[in-house]
Image (cartoon, grey):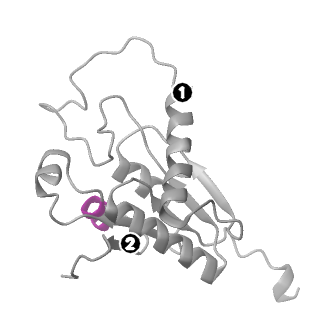
Amino acid sequence: MNDASRDTGPRPRIVVGVDDSPGGLAALRYAISLAEADGRPLVAVRSWALGLPAHGGRRHQHQGREHPHVVLYFDDALARAQSADFVRTAMREATGGIPWNVDLTIETPEGDPGVALVGIATAGSDILVVGSDRGQSVRHLVHGSVGHYCREHASCPVIVVPAVGEPER
């Protein structure tokens, strides 16, 4: 058996969390360039949930529950379609269009963004890319930091990309 015929398992991927913040767009640009340079598939992830902030971010529990409202029926098809459209719009804003030279998959899972990203980037050879916006401390206090959650829980390397023009710390 030669090396070319050997099954080496799933291809290592670049998994990127997508939002439209300056840090989120910088992370998307970085993830696309990394996927292009390494020839890795790109998985763009935009999670959604009832009560999840429109800009992204993590959802804090309310007295031990995920969300205090009760929903008896909800068709998730519209939320998933809107999340996929959001990813395509963010790519156009970040890089001018959908990358034609990258094997792209758009994932639109329901749930908390950090949990969703860590749940998708499960292979140790994956690379998880998320954005960070310093100066958004009130938002982070209210909704939490996706980047922090991912750094604490991911089983693969995590790259946190600051917004363009922000100093590294």
Q: Which residue appears at 52% of the width and 50% of the height?
A: 89
Left or right of 55, for residue 144: left
Instruction: State the residue lying farthest toward the top.
Output: 72
Residue 78: mark in rendering: 1
Task: Please identify the quarter of the rendering in which residue 61 is found.
Answer: top left
Residue type at tag 2: Val
- Give whichever of 112, 16 is nearer the camera: 16
Q: Is residue 84 left or right of residue 128?
A: right
Secondary structure, mark 2, is strand
Residue at left 60%, top 72%?
Answer: 12
Q: Determine the CA span between mark 1 and mark 2.
A: 30 Å
Q: Is residue 151 magenta?
A: yes
Q: Residue 49's x, y, as percent?
A: 38, 34
Q: Amino acid at mark 1?
A: Leu
User: Could you say which quadrant of the image residue 168 lies in?
Assistant: bottom left
Where does residue 20 sit, x and y in percent of width and height?
38, 53
Residue highlighted by disc 2: 158
Q: Looking at the image, is 141 positioned above or below residue 40?
A: above
* Quadrant in the picture for the C terminus: bottom left
N-term mark: 1 or 2 = 1
The magenta segment = 147-152
Q: Nearer the viewer, residue 41 or 37?
A: 37
